[in-house]
Amino acid sequence: MVKIMTNRYQDILSDMQESLFLRENGDNSSKLITLVENAVAAMIARQGDGPIYPSDSDTSITDVMSSAAIPERYNFSHSTTVEQVANEMQRSVKVHSPLMVKNIIPQPNFVYLAAYVATSLYMGNAVTGEDAGEALKDELACASAIAKMAGMDPTKASGVFTFGGTGTNLYAVKIGLAKAKPKHALEGVIDNDTVVIGNAASHYSQQTSANWTGIGQNNYLKVKTNIDQTTDLSDLEKVCRRALDSGKKIACIEAVGGTTSSMGMDDVEEIYKLRSQLIKEYSLSYTPHIHVDSVLGWVWLNFIDYDFDKNPLGFSVRALKSAQHNANMARKFCFADSLGVDFHKTGYTPYNSSIVILKNKDDFNFLKRQKDIMTPLFHDENEYNPGIYTIETSRSVANIVATWVTLKTIGKEGYQVLLGHALEMREAFVDREKDINAAGMIIENKNSATTDIFLRSIVTGSDVQNEHRKELYDDNILAANTEYTSNFYEWFVDREGKNPKIAFSKSSASFYNHNGKPVVAFRIVLLGVNCSVETINYLIDYIINAKKIFDTENSI
């Protein structure tokens, strides 16, 4: 009897068809589900109890780069491979730990993850509806739904998903540049006569946008910031007038609407009025673009039609007051020409999921590419083809679909609960103010309506509240307390090592004092779904005890 031998090519192809790729009829989808289950189980089994994924590795970047190599042979052990992903998670943040309170990193929801994986199997490219089909219309649904909440006409508004908050700012500045200098796309920005104007405390991605569009980082003009991190509107007017008086064109005015760096929310209506006044006075032939960098603050739109009198969800008085303040500020986003949204921040989706929304969809025409330079891709003119103006030519439709599914699942009420919970946890933190003050620290932003806490150590006197009031004007006192706070943070991080019990971050500019000097503070973000009053008390007690040890070691 002759034994039929199969070659390795056939063995590998057969395994791929069975276990690595979806069959035509999809009857092997259980292989994918098993791999996901194994990967998640392996990671959870090793995640430990702390806020950071445990680490026992001392591998340097140089070691990784020198030893990295793609294997010569195909690996048939797929489960083993995905289970080894747990090794790569070492020192990563654990967002589901209530003790992980550094930066704005919320938990991703299961509905998004399920929809993303399922949709990814079909590889729709969001460059055109010819490839992505009906799924791409979810992009329009997301944009219209949020525009409607913001008080914009959903039939006139539109938006595109992009690569993060930086992308949303980049779109806004690019559109503003096109309005101010219509020929720049062909001729370049060669006259050094265009500026972008924004809050000094805003996220650095605004300056990045000025850099990458060719306007130039030096042509990003910083406006003074108020103590609450909002834009000083009086100084904004001065900066705008100086620019126009010197012959400059204003491509974009960037308002803050709750950004990663600056949680302040500007009165956008007042900025709109200022722009209208400047257009009239200076007889401008163009309209400076107003963008709200609202990558965090957009989510407060969900509270705009909440019944604050009846308070159906039963929030506390203080939390309710904060939510109402934020909703009232977000209500004025409609006066902007565009706004940025990070779903991967306050939308509780994974990285990265962001959208820039335009009040007037015709503004996208400023970004259209010339047909003669584009790959012959867009054959059906009746299709939705965002690829003719997006900076990206490859965009996964899976992220768009999963985000829309998330919005439909959580809904306004769900986001009200998530935000309300964060505000309640913030109030629980503020309730411990006496203990915090007694330990030589102050809550800088105790009266704000944000979902984070800025904690600063005071070494210049025992009356910490009074010393903090002094440092708002006295830069010497400010410098002493800043050095003390920074030293405490560095000591704390070094003491905790690779496997800390709690994890928070340090802000190099939690706000600016009246002399424009940055104020350093610990930043504690309370967006975690699993956060509780017990968690808050543990965090506070842990920091207070650590500070006692630090002070003892440093004879303070």
Image (cartoon, rainbow, N blue to C red):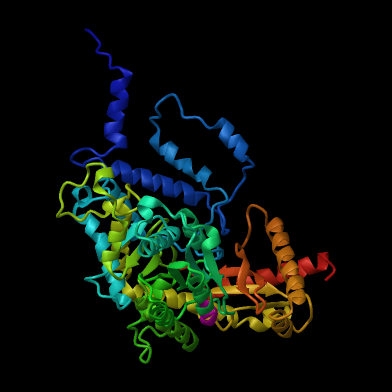
Q: Is residue 208 above or below residue 545?
A: above
Residue at the spot x=21%, y=52% of the render? 129
* Range shown magenta: 232-236
Q: Residue furthest bottom?
A: 309
- The answer to which quarter of the image holds residue 17 is top left
The foreground one among 9 and 50 is 9
Furthest residue toward top: 1
For the stretch drawn in magenta, the main secondary structure is: helix
As drawn, 223 above or below 382: below
Q: Is residue 227 left or right of residue 208?
A: right
Residue 555 image offset from top left, x and y in percent: 85, 68
Q: Is residue 509 visible?
A: yes
Task: Residue 269: give x, y in percent of width and height.
Answer: 40, 82
Q: Locate residue 38, reporting x and y percent.
A: 40, 45
Q: For the N terminus, which image quadrant?
A: top left
Magenta-span inclusion, residue 179: no
Look at the image and tell me whether residue 204 can be seen: no
Residue 147 coordinates in the image, percent (x, y):
30, 72
Queried whether the magenta region covers residue 234, the answer comes back as yes
Q: Residue at x 75, y 67 (%)?
A: 483
**Position of residue 22 in the picture relative to residue 470 (left or right):** left
**Front-most of 231 and 30?**
231
- Residue at horizontal 55%, vertical 65%? 101
